Image (cartoon, grey):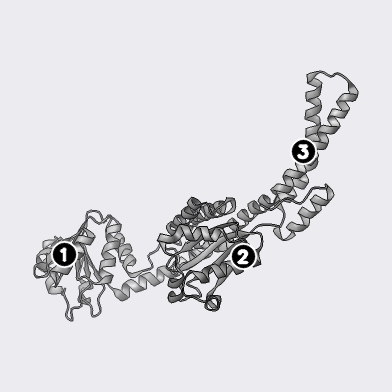
Amino acid sequence: MAREILIVGVNHHRAPVEIRERLGFDNGRFDDVLQRLAALPAIDEGAIVSTCNRVEVIATTSDGDHAVESLTDFLALNESVTRDQLAHYLSVYRGREAVRHLFRVAASLDSMVVGEPQILGQLKEFYGRAAHAGTAGTVLHRCFHKSFSVAKRVRTETGVASRAVSVSSAAVELATRIFDSLEDKTVLLIGAGTMGELAARHLLGHGVQRLLITNRTLERAQELARELRGTAVPFTELQHHLPQADVVIGSTAADAYVLTPDRLHEILRQRRYRPVFLIDLSVPRNFDPQLNEMDNVYLYDIDDLGGVAEVNRDERLREADKAEGIIDDEVETFWHWLASLDAVPTIVALRERADAIRRVELERTLAAFGPVTPATREALEAMTSAIVNKLLHGPMTRLKQRDRENEAFYLAAVRALFDIEEPEQQ
């Protein structure tokens, strides 16, 4: 019976976070969990992917229906989720659809934010744990590695990950349009709000070397500065530090503008009118909208950034359509490999049967000839081997390239025609 690839679990499409978090596996017990998975009678190979958006078991089996039931029980036993509750949220992918799902996950086409880069690293980590535990075998090794190359191809050949789709990452994208390089730029974060911190982290991740942080509570500024390796400055000295800043992020709860045209005129003069990029992430706004009318001042508020992110999301979705075509091609490539793998025992047996007949008949013919020279024997060996190879080429090619829906028919026909025993299950 042919092996089947299955994915059974929950993900963000159907299961709410309160279900996903209850099914998540504890990192400290992960190896034990993998061994329990591998011990299930219906499972040949297995791996587990457990992130905030999905808890899914990837497995191979020769008894698909039994394996689905076993994996459902396996997941329900993990934490306080009954089997009936789990059944309501469960997603099951079988055969080609399982391969397609894994490839789409790796390429970040199945993520909440299409194109986000984190999932590929997570997938590699979970595959590595299964490989180390010995629960991933030939099929899953090939399937996971193929998913990694598919993800690389999608990122290389499409723009699915090329545009910023969060407010903070959109701010970084705009900053790179304004400045040739961010490495020599100074960022000033006013306030210690979450969105401001996130924008600062994104800028640091894109090369910014110097970060100043100010807050009405100096201790909070110092705490965040230690975490981000920045420099805390007193809020009362803001006017003194503003001329140094090429990028200013507003993230305070102030009910009045922190920056106004009058205040910025003097700052620009001290900067010798070098451009300044203002990112206003606060509601109410921290920066007077009239600042955008000044030369060499680029002001974006949270709605502006949200608009950039939305446009980019639409562009990513258009690129995702191209990526789906790549996924289709790669699924078929993998499927042909898997089909040929299942045919290997029959192909080997067919060749062994044909070669055994060849050798018996050759020896019988040589015995009838009497003594022959080594050159003659070698010539007859080559001739009979060539005949066997030519006769087997067509059937063996068909076995490797057949449609898996007709798999049982082809294999059974070959075994019956050539009197080959059914291969033992591994």
Q: Going 50% across and 61% down the picture, which residue do you hit? A: 48
Mark 3, residue position: 389
Q: Secondary structure at mark 1?
A: helix
Tell me the distance, in whole angstroms, between the alpha carbons under discs 1 and 2: 55 Å
Callout 3: 10 Å neighbours few (<14), some, many (20+)? Answer: some
Q: Going 43% across and 61% down the picture, which residue do you hit? A: 29
Q: Secondary structure at mark 2?
A: helix
Q: Residue furthest right?
A: 368
Q: Going 67% across and 53% down the picture, which residue do you hit? A: 339
Lower position in the chain sequence, tag 1 or tag 3 = 1
In the picture, measured across the screen, residue 244 lies left or right of residue 43, that is left
In the picture, measured across the screen, residue 261 lies left or right of residue 395, that is left
Q: Quadrant of residue 170?
A: bottom left
Lower position in the chain sequence, tag 2 or tag 3 = 2
Callout 1: 10 Å neighbours few (<14), some, many (20+)? Answer: many
> On screen, 219 above or below 210?
below
Instruction: Residue type at mark 1: give it.
Output: Gln
Estimate the x, y position of residue 237 in percent, counting from the top left. 9, 67
Q: Quadrant of residue 166?
A: bottom left
Estimate the x, y position of residue 393 in percent, counting from the top left. 76, 43
Estimate the x, y position of residue 185 in percent, counting from the top left. 22, 57
Tell me the distance, in whole angstroms, between the alpha carbons under discs 2 and 3: 40 Å
Tell me the distance, in whole angstroms, between the alpha carbons under discs 1 and 3: 77 Å
Mark 1, residue position: 222
Q: In this orientation, does residue 94 appear?
A: yes
Badge number at residue 67: 2
